[in-house]
Image: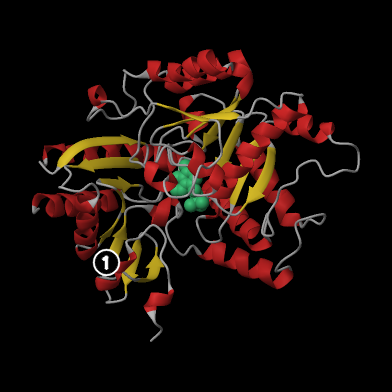
Amino acid sequence: MSDPRHFWMPFTPNRSFAKQPQVLVRAEGMHYWSDDGNKLLDACSGLFCCALGHGRPEILEAIAEQYQRLDFSPPFRYAQPAAFELADVLAHMMPSRLDRIFFTNSGSESVDTALKIARLYHNAAGEKQRHRFVSRDRGYHGVNFGGVSVAGMEKNRENFGPGIPGVLHKRHTAIETNRLTPGQAENGADLADDLQEFVDTHGADTIAACIVEPIAGSTGILVPPKGYLERLREICDEHGILLIFDEVITGFGRTGKAFAAETFGVVPDIITVAKALTNGAVPMGAVAVRRDIHERITSSAPDGAIEFFHGYTYSAHPLACAAGLATQRIFREEGVFERAAQLAPYFQERIFELQDLSAIKDIRGYGLLAGIDLAPGDRAGDTGTAVLKRLFANNLVVRVTNDTIILAPALVAEREHIDRICDILRTTLASR
Ligand code: PLP
């Protein structure tokens, strides 16, 4: 038996985990199996990644075939066919004109890449002073320095020094008046005017971009009020500010369409994705950029010069591209996004039925995403941790942030899976 202490676990209370480990050893379809042989229902698509459920043989075959043909090729100054193919597939899925695709290996890398692109775009037009980013409280944009700087999560930022300067945070949209509102609330579009206030205070000509998750995922599924994203778009247009949608969670069918941009009818200038891009089988992220942004940047460099001094050893890794192509093919051929759109109302209805439980303070949801706030204990996060453990014991795998349970079942889930998720939640939360 290997010594478990060598593994430093991410975003985990390592010492208490060691006392009561939760170890998953196998997965198939909608289920995991733990090391003690229990079969657990996966209510969070792994970590929002496995939209098709686990272990799709087509993805395995695509990866194996790619490995035999071309295991790795250097991504700087060389390319391989699957990269062109996957970029082409994504370009055709993206909202119009966001058809230049930069590959990364994670959501965090996608975010930092997008932030750099935004500054570079303004630099290329001689507007170097546009360095600020506007983001939002309770936003999550990964863990690299750019991402934690723009994210609105104190704990992810404190103790790591100053981060990147010039970031301004708007207020979040989970306001008390919208408690227990299914879908998009009527109130709160005016919260987008925080961006206008920053423009008035700091000058539009200092702001490079506004970055938001269309639905804030990791801090508990904060659905945008009606008109909120539209208002952000208007303000950005008026002042030459780029709008970045971080769709690392909402991308690939989670809201019933390929992207939340399409669902909400608001087209940003840049979209970041990761997670379900490859169904979680191989790490990969991507940044989709408006064509004219790409053109401005590339044409500003002298002919023959590198235009963007940025990239990763594993950008467009052949195995990730193969997994991405196989995943996107299944999404298309099996009408997975349409299926998700059909299942979503049932999921939302069943989740909101839980609101009679006294352990629950608020529920928010959209598409196949839901956040359930639990009544907190003496210390923030303790209730969430305890509930996560009890749900695991009752054979349900969820994501917990602080005292909020987050649900994101696979897009291929059946009604019976939703029923089971709700039954386990009810039994577990009622017995507190
Ligand atoms: N952006 C958003 C909106 C996310 O939800 C996440 C992860 O959950 C990230 C970025 C970071 O992605 P990763 O963990 O792949 O770096």
Q: Quadrant of the N terminus?
A: bottom left
Looking at this view, is 383 or 227 the one in front?
A: 383
| Amino acid on which the number 1 mark rests in the picture | Ser
Name the residue rendered at 44%, 16% in the picture.
193
| Residue on which the image places disc 1 | 16
Q: For residue 74, which quarter of the picture?
A: bottom right
Measured along the vertical axis of the image, is residue 426 above or below residue 231? below
**Residue 112 appears in view:** yes
Name the residue rendered at 65%, 44% in the picture.
89
* Badge 1 density bin: few <14, some 14–19, many ≥20, Cα 10 Å: few
Q: Regarding mark 1 in the picture, which secondary structure is present there?
A: helix
**Residue 247 appears in view:** no
Answer left or right for 207 relative to 23.
Answer: right
Measured along the vertical axis of the image, is residue 219 above or below residue 9? above
Q: How many numbered discs, if any?
A: 1
User: How far across and how far down the image is residue 222, in percent?
Assistant: 35, 34
User: How far across and how far down the image is residue 144, in percent?
Assistant: 54, 49
Q: Residue furthest bottom?
A: 1
Answer left or right for 129 relative to 260.
Answer: right
Name the residue rendered at 56%, 39% in the picture.
164
Whether disc 1's CB lies below 8 Å from ligand 1 is answered no
Name the residue rendered at 25%, 28% in the picture.
181
Measured along the vertical axis of the image, is residue 170 above or below residue 275? above
Looking at this view, is 331 or 33 the one in front?
A: 33
How are the colours assigned in the image?
secondary structure
User: How far across and how far down the image is residue 195, in percent?
Assistant: 48, 20
Looking at this view, is 224 or 235 the one in front?
A: 235
Q: Residue furthest right?
A: 303
User: How far across and how far down the image is residue 266, in percent?
Assistant: 52, 24
